[in-house]
Image (tube, rainbow, N blue to C red):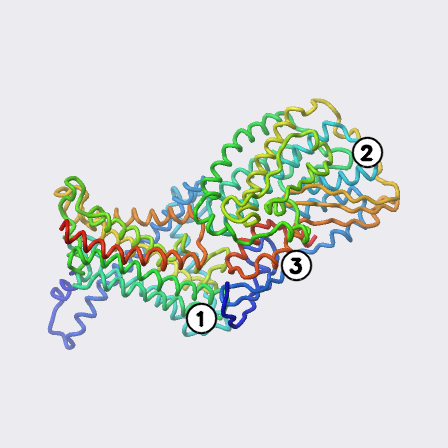
Amino acid sequence: MGIVKGDQMVLNIGPQHPSTHGVLRLKVVTDGEIVSDIEPIIGYLHRCFEKHCENSTYEQVIPFTDRCDYIASMNNNFGYVVAMEKLMEIKVPDRVEYIRIIMAELNRIASHLLALGVYGLDVGAFTPFLYMFRDRERILDIFELTCGARLLYNYMWVGGVSHDLPVGFVETVYGFLDYFEPKLKEYNEILTYNKIFIERTADVGVLPPEVAISYGVSGPNLRGSGVKWDLRKDEPYSIYERFDFDVPVGEGTVGTTGDCWDRFYVRMLEMTESAKILRQALKDLPQDGDVHQAIPKKIRPPKGSIYQRTESPRGDLAYYIISDGTPQPYRLKMRSPAFTALSVLNEISRGWMLSDVIAILGSLDIVLGEIDR
Amino acid sequence: MIVDRLIDWLPTGVAWPGLTFIVAVILCAVPVFLFIAVYALVAIYGELKISSFIQDKVGPMGQGVGLHAWRWGLLQPVADALKLILKEDIIPSAADKKLFILAPFIVFIGAFIAFSALPFSQTIIIADMNIGIFYILAVSSLGVIGIILAGWSSNNKWSLYGAMRSAAQIVSYEIPAALSIVVVIMLTSTMSMQGIIQYQSGLVWGFLPNWLLFNNPFTFLAFIIFFISGVAECNRTPFDIPEAESELVAGAFTEYSGMRYAFFFLSEYANMFVVSGVAAAAFMGGWQSPIPGMFDTPGWGLFWFMSKSMFLIFMMIWFRWTFPRLRVDQLMDVCWKGFIPISLFNIFGVGIWYLLVG
């Protein structure tokens, strides 16, 4: 696109803009509507997460992880505690493992619902957003029931979880699943297979698998490009190897493999898979076991380091922790999946129109809290 | 018609003969303005409530204090309007002040003067011109000048984007809309709004009212094209790219606030009514009753015209809360590669139909 090269104009999208999903600034060089270069400028939400961790004890880090990817706090907690438990060689009770899986998968559904709903907004469809928020609300209610918090849970602790499951929890989640699974059809009818939506997203912002891999893109964005890579399957942590689920990948159903529609639809399918995992976990959930039993009195890991990857709803979330034997980490590094996803934006948006840039950015599902940390 | 009668009724022989005409026009303009204001409040309430039904929420329900608290939130739009009036009127320091102030008026005038040729009933029409429908098509595109002025004078890149998109869009969609109206004029052989409606009396196919919509397949197609182009001219979803919220913040209106913004808002709703009114008059029989021979007094005529127009407005609101937004080039494709060829073919088809069937 763009045969004649006209004068270029620099347009700043953000930091305050309805579609940058947070305080992100995109310095866009445009030729009329056509975008020739994008420079994402980050750091507006920088809170020195990693430096803070060096001055906090290990248990004090957990609330910080909540605030990184605030859409999927459970998964962020999960990654950190899995890393810590590996470093300290703690074996947690089965019940705790199951509770964690249930929470992580519920949060994955909640996170995808938000991502897909907001994506609808990005391409101008208002109603699907409210449908998905309505259903996300139920998940937040379940979290509130469990730990009292709706967004930032501080639920998973090293060696256990903060609260045992409340009475009636299993029935509530079953009720939610029975309600939720038919709703996916509704979303598909109103948004996924809408003609205009397909026009807007099919073939737009194609992310070829080799580019995705070379940029380190992971999670649904990578799977949307047709690469079957899911840490829950390929490098199982916690007890994910016990569950039977598929890893959906983009197949280019309505356009090219790796376009915005594929990234969107992969998330839609992942919600089904999460629901599948949830049903299995609820069935096998051990009835007894003290969730506080394995929590160490004093968290003082031996000297050494650990790099633990987990699959957050945004992709490959990893913690690198160096311990010098004191109660505070010597260094803590978080590998943010949204950060790598944002880095690929310029590569796949060049030559597309301004509206497409918004659509592509939305399909990458970034969370600025995690990018800036 | 009303304006003619007023001129007859007003005392003549004043110092300056033009004065009678001016007084008559003002006497007509005030009720039209009031009508637009009241209708806009109703339409906004409708928009709030219909979107709530579609989106599984309740909408304004009369919570809180003040105007909002009245039953079913009926005064919510009044409260909204009051808020806009009381808000600070901000003119950016870098803006071209004169044009910035002028723009909302031009946009509103475009929508406002089109009302003078809308046939509300057999007797209620401000001026039944012999080129009525042509006049409406002509003046309703005035608004685009205002939008370009707004976009340019705001001195803001978003506004400029919105204005350029809007100009391209409205100018393009004028063409299929006008070409669809040509079909109407061919059949009715008049451009007077009342004449077009009078043509649509009686029955067609033995049981359907003789609305042009049902007259033959080509007119049905023309109606669809006219209505969709009308939605595009009003900048409503799925064609709302000029003010695409998620891309351009608020398009050409980004820098406007308070009453000036309210005027753009009012014009959008007034435009919706003009488009729906013309579609109702030209294709759905205007004030003609759906059961020919019954309920056809002027009072019922007003009722039928308003019902048909409001139904089309309901359709627009329905579109808005259901569809995503098209991209600017796709929007142009729909117009230039889809609607215009079909409209041209339509004119040809109607001609053949007219020759063969009559």
Query: Left or right: A69 with respect to B52?
Result: right
Residue B246 horizontal/vertical position (percent): 50, 55
Q: CA distance from mark 3 to mark 2?
A: 37 Å
Residue A160 position (above or below residue B269): above
Residue corresponding to mark 2: A90
Mark 3: secondary structure: loop
Residue at 27 percent of width and 50 percent of height: B221
**Do discs 3 and 1 share a chain?**
no
Residue B83 x %, y % = 43, 56
Three-letter code, disc 2: Ile
Write down the residue under mark 1: B152
Is disc 3 in contact with disc 1, using a CB cutoff of under 8 Å? no
Query: As drawn, is A336 to the left or to the right of B218?
Result: right
Dot 1: what SS?
helix
Residue nearer the viewer, B97 or B341: B341
Residue A104 position within the rendered picture, expressed as x and y whole percent measured from the top left: 66, 37
Q: Residue at x 68, y 31 (%)?
A: A99
Measure the alpha-carbon separation of dots 2 and 1. Answer: 65 Å
User: Which dot marks residue A42?
Assistant: 3
